[in-house]
Image: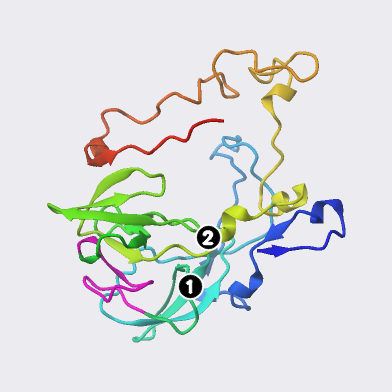
Amino acid sequence: MKSYNPTTPSRRHMTSVGSHLVSRGKPLKSLTKRVREDSGRNNQGRITTRHQGGGSKKLYRMVDFRQNIMDIPSKVERIEYDPYRNAFIARIIYQNGKRSYILAYSSAKEGDLIVCSQKAPVKDGNRMMLKNIPVGYMVHNIEINPGKGGQVAKSAGSYAEVVANDENYTTLKMPSSERRKVLWDCFASIGQVSNPDYSLMTIGKAGRSRWLGVRPTVRGSAMNPVDHPYGGGEGRQKRGTRKPKTLWGKVTGGRKTRNRKKWSNKLIVSRRIKKNKK
């Protein structure tokens, strides 16, 4: 982590991930595109997600979550910063000359050789079928449906652990501690996602949140009664409602939101371990 000299009060506690971990220079133009910023608005222009807007101008990097070029080795050319995600990305070049972006694994460095194959050598960065990955290994960018591309464990520092392989299914211990079965014909990349120190980063000041496109958030208890169920009262008042509620009065916190009839419930071996509130 990089810390800063306390030249201002906001700089005193600010931290960031060191820029020495990523390569300098611009991204590959053919693998970038401009994405329209809607600031949390729908097709009628109405705000449907609060606290979004502004932010620095940025280009979207087209990351290949499938990596469906099989049995052709590739080399890591660069480790790059991606403004649309908290993990780093790696630019790779295949032996046939094609380039693409993939999620960088935690130990990735320039010059590494990786390959995607049904059964590849078990080392960080290689991508292979779950049934061929030994028990105990960390995996990321995991497919849920064969051929669809990675959907699980893609954020900074994330990984799932291979627990068992049995009867066409691989049991994975998810980042949430939930254990669930996934078809063992699905592909996954070995290792942990890059930038595991991201969770330790301190924003430091409000302006840095604005750079990231995050607008100010106001506590419900600081509002008037007309604006929020928690609003009103003199000074710092308690919530005033028996159950925690959203701005629109919907009960939240403690209420289960997962559909009890969802088809994939049968694939969950054990639910996540809930953390005790202090």
Q: Disc number at residue 180?
A: none
Check the image and tell me how it is coloured: rainbow
Instruction: Give whichever of 190, 45 is nearer the camera.
Output: 190
Q: Position of residue 101 (x, y in %)?
A: 45, 71
Residue at point 23%, 41% (across, down)? 267
Give the residue at mark 2: 196
Instruction: Return the x and y of residue 204 as percentages of the image width and height.
Output: 74, 51
The residue lying toward the viewer, choosing from 15 and 257, is 15
On the rendered image, what quadrant is the C terminus found in?
Answer: top right
**Residue 277 vs residue 147, the one in the foreground:** 277
Q: Residues within 10 Å of mark 2 (few under 14, many from 20)?
A: some
Whether residue 216 is situated above or below residue 62 in the rendered picture: above
Which residue is labeled 1 in the image? Answer: 90
x and y percent of residue 141 in the render? 37, 60
Q: Tell me which residue sits at (47%, 65%) in the image.
A: 62
Q: Give the residues drawn in magenta, as a range.
A: 114-131
Residue type at tag 2: Pro
x%, y% of residue 192?
A: 43, 63
Q: Amino acid under label 1?
A: Ala
Quarter of the rendering containing residue 262: top left
Whether residue 74 is visible to the viewer of this picture, yes or no, is yes
Classify mark 2: helix, strand or loop: helix
Q: Number of numbered discs present?
A: 2
Magenta segment's dominant SS is loop
Question: 101 or 53: which is nearer to us?
Answer: 101
Indicate which label's residue lies in the foreground, 1 or 2: 2
| Figure quadrant of the N terminus | bottom right
